[in-house]
């Protein structure tokens, strides 16, 4: 069975998804979700990775991150947060075996309007799952953190996020985020879109051509296709396990 894609290029924004082994609900309790958040905070400090958005659901996680250090720190960052979370859970539950699916998947996201679309997609996870009727009701998420900024232990790099979005203040981001979610709820745009969790990259055509060029030989068989109002760089020759659990 093919493995998930992980092509990291410094200087880009990546949407990372990873689900629990066999779709098990290993994050069904808040203390386990908080454990993941703790190690996410520690890992972003240690590896200097900017977390732009996130959510931890009952059986999978989403991350929107960037690494502008040029040092390729995202794999180490992921190894720490996912490894320590699994270790603590197994130790506490006297459990053996895999906590996560084999690999996480990474999709490059263009730093234009596509990043907003991706943030809305991440925020709407538990609404899609029918668990809550609004993203603000799921506390272990970037949406909740933006709406209720932390004085200590903030996970989101607000300086980076505001710069990427071209927004001057956190207060303005607060207002805009509410508008984005209202538009999604009013338009009933809550359905799952596979491009955010299965493509190599999502954005405008020029962005995807650039990603494919940077990947060089790795991307020769990859195709750019239009997906609604956007484009995605897909990998038809390497299908991954269907992301039915990634709401």
Image (cartoon, rainbow, N blue to C red):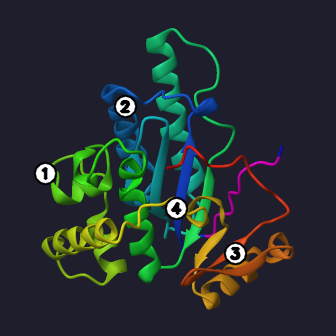
Q: Is residue 51 left or right of residue 101?
A: left
Q: Are marks 2 and 4 in contact (CB under 8 Å)?
A: no
Marked residue nearer the N-terminal end (3 or 2): 2
Q: Position of residue 45 (x, y in %)?
A: 37, 50
> Is 56 drawn above or below residue 68 in the view shown?
above
Marked residue nearer the N-terminal end (1 or 3): 1
Q: Residue at x 22, y 60 (%)?
A: 146
> Is 206 drawn above or below residue 165 in the view shown?
below
In reply to whether residue 7 is colored magenta, the answer given is yes
Query: Which mark identifies residue 233?
Result: 3
Q: Name the chief secondary structure element in magenta.
A: loop
Query: Which mark identifies residue 151?
Result: 1
Q: Nearer the viewer, mark 2 or mark 1?
A: 2
Q: Position of residue 83 (x, y in %)?
A: 55, 33
How many angstroms separate mark 2 from mark 1 (CA)? Answer: 19 Å
How many angstroms separate mark 3 from mark 2 (CA)? Answer: 34 Å
Q: Are marks 3 and 2 in contact (CB under 8 Å)?
A: no
Circle 1: is it few (<14), some (14-19), or many (20+) Cα within 10 Å? Answer: few
Q: Nearer the viewer, mark 2 or mark 4?
A: 4
How many angstroms separate mark 1 from mark 3 (CA)? Answer: 39 Å
Circle 2: is it few (<14), some (14-19), or many (20+) Cα within 10 Å? Answer: some
Circle 4: is it few (<14), some (14-19), or many (20+) Cα within 10 Å? Answer: many
Judging by the rendered image, the residue that carries numbered circle 2 is 35
Q: Are marks 4 and 1 in contact (CB under 8 Å)?
A: no
Q: Nearer the viewer, mark 3 or mark 2?
A: 3
Q: Are marks 1 and 3 in contact (CB under 8 Å)?
A: no
Judging by the rendered image, the residue that carries numbered circle 4 is 15
Under tag 2, what secondary structure?
Answer: helix
Q: Are marks 4 and 3 in contact (CB under 8 Å)?
A: no
């Amino acid at each position: 069975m093919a493995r998930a894609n992980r092509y990291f290029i410094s200087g880009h924004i990546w949407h990372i998804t990873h689900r629990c082994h066999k779709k098990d609900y290993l994050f069904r309790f808040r203390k386990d979700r908080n454990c993941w958040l703790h190690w996410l905070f520690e890992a972003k400090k240690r590896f200097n990775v900017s977390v732009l958005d996130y959510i931890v659901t009952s059986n999978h996680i989403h991350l929107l991150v960037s690494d502008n250090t040029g040092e390729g720190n995202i794999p180490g960052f992921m190894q720490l947060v996912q490894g320590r979370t699994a270790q603590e859970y197994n130790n506490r539950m006297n459990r053996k075996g895999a906590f996560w699916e084999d690999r996480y998947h990474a999709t490059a996201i263009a730093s234009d309007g596509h990043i907003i679309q991706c943030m809305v997609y991440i925020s709407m996870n538990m609404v899609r799952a029918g668990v809550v009727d609004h993203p603000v009701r799921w506390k272990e998420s970037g949406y909740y953190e933006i709406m209720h900024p932390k004085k200590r232990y903030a996970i989101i790099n607000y300086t980076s996020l505001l710069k990427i979005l071209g927004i001057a203040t956190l207060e303005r981001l607060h207002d805009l985020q509410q508008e984005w979610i209202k538009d999604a709820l009013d338009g009933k745009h809550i359905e799952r879109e596979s491009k955010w969790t299965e493509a190599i990259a999502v954005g405008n055509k020029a962005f995807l051509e650039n990603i494919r060029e940077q990947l060089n030989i790795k991307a020769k068989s990859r195709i750019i296709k239009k997906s609604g109002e956007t484009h995605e760089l897909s990998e038809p020759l390497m299908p991954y396990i269907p992301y039915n659990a990634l709401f």
